[in-house]
Image (tube, rainbow, N blue to C red):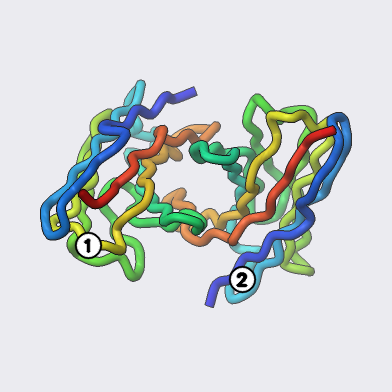
Amino acid sequence: EVQLMESGGGLVQPGGSLRLSCAASGFTFSGYWMHWVRQAPGKGLVWVSRVDSDGSNTDYADSVKGRFTISRNNAENTLYLQMNSLRAEDTAMYYCTRGGVDRSTDYWGQGTLVTVSS
Amino acid sequence: DIVMTQTPLSSPVTLGQPASISCRSGQSLVHSSGNTYLSWLQQRPGQPPRLLFYKISNRFSGVPDRFSSSGAGTDFTLKISRVEAEDVGVYYCMQATEFPYTFGQGTKLEIK
């Protein structure tokens, strides 16, 4: 069974940093792209970033480019999102999702909540 | 960025009746490969999103056959033949033809 479990969220002050993790199990992690998608409270889904299967290629939404870094450790089946210079507008539930066949986002974690506030 | 526009934003439906959601993209979603990377996701209250369809009409594992998806180019439609109580939630279309991936605003399906 494919499982994705995010962690690392919490309350942080504006300008602060957090590192999110996503532990993957039930599939060959190193064979798949992985994505982060976020959802502000009561709002819609927004794609944040993706990393390819070996970590060599990444893409970011303009709103996080230069502040967030996606990475992965295939030996430990874990996806990361390093978030720096956090702003109030980064407050959201952050989901990791697997990039499945034909660019689908086929499995999603339960999410981890990030709150940026003083 | 490709803008995805869904209509309606809210859809009150009677149990057992059909429902339809439209998604229009600001430009063609046909990739250079010839594929069209349009997905539909469902988000039930308090739950993470769940994939329903990918590449327009490919049904994901476990999705009931009362759901169907169609379309081409810039216009796509998700249909539910007979709405059940468990279908309540928000439905999103998503394009993955180019980065950044973008989502529609979401359509809230509720029971009348």
The residue under label 1 is: B84
Tell me which residue sits at (22%, 57%) in the image.
B67
Tell me which residue sits at (62%, 38%) in the image.
A48
Q: Position of residue A65 (x, y in %)?
A: 72, 28
Please state which of residues A91 and B53 is positioned toward the viewer in this rendering.
A91
In the rendered structure, which amino acid carries the disc numbered 1? Answer: Glu
Q: Position of residue B17 (x, y in %)?
A: 11, 54
Q: Residue furthest front?
A: B112
In the rendered structure, which amino acid carries the disc numbered 2? Answer: Thr
Marks 2 and 1, how far apart in space? 35 Å
Please state which of residues A44 and B103 is positioned toward the viewer in this rendering.
A44
* Quarter of the rendering containing residue A49: top right
The residue under label 2 is: A28
Tell me which residue sits at (45%, 40%) in the image.
B96
Q: Give the crowd class for mark 1: few <14, some 14-19, many >=20 residues within 10 Å.
A: some
Q: Chain of mark 2?
A: A
Q: Is residue A35 above or below residue A79?
A: above
Q: Chain of mark 1?
A: B
- A91 to the left or right of B39: right
- B13 to the left or right of A27: left
Q: Position of residue A54 (x, y in %)?
A: 70, 55
Q: Position of residue A85 (x, y in %)?
A: 84, 30
Residue B73 appears in the rendering: no
